[in-house]
Image: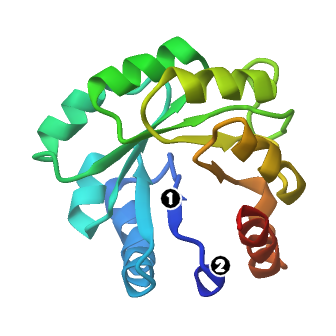
Amino acid sequence: MLDVGITAIQLREKDLSDPELIELARPIAELCQNYEAKLFINTNIRVALKIGATGVHLPAAAVSVDAVKAQSDDCLCVGCSVHALDAAQKREAEGADFVTYSPIYPTASKPGYGPAVGIAGLTQVAEGVNLPVFALGGITPARIAECLAAGAFGVAVMSGVMSATGAKEQARNYLDALC
């Protein structure tokens, strides 16, 4: 996917020990550096610092952004998952660099987060904060223009590019839709 121009990757491995996560993340970090792409580690500040990741991505119920910035001497970019405008505003006040807002559309990747918030919800969040908002959840290449028109800075995708075959082509489809 990096070959076609993906600019950021979030490594989301919640069940690995720190040594296991470092072993997995190190070669990904090297690839991202070679491609000048950003690598975000889900939640684990220690691992992000150890491997030289761009930053961390925090789930909705994680520690405050202030705590992450203090623990990392403010050298990590911090993104946060949010599911409502008030949560996005809270994360912005804490110093988040960006938020991912979801689920925009119905998706099997986001069970338990309630019904899809839709384009109206995305517009409300994008207009309600002064930081980049990435749309997540049920995003397809055909839906990207609608998300951007609603104020999204960009999109984040999981299942749309996670297939064992065709990931590169699918990533290209997403990138083409963003242009």
Q: Considering only vertical position in the picture, is 117 above or below 40? A: above
Residue 15 percent location from the top left of the image: 50, 47
**CA gap, disc 1 and disc 2:** 14 Å
Q: Position of residue 106 (x, y in %)?
A: 86, 33
What residue type is disc 1 on? Answer: Leu
The residue type indicated by label 2 comes to Met
Which quadrant of the view contains residue 103? top right
Marks 1 and 2: which is nearer the front?
A: 2
Quadrant of the snapshot with the C terminus: bottom right
Which numbered marker is on residue 11?
A: 1
Give how far across and how far down residue 96 sits, in percent: 34, 35
Compared with residue 176, is residue 79 higher up or lower down, i.e. above or below?
above
Horizontal side, residue 83 vs residue 57: left or right: right
Residue ID for mark 2: 1
Q: Nearer the viewer, residue 77 or 48?
A: 77
Residue 92, percent across and down? 37, 26
Res 58 visible: yes
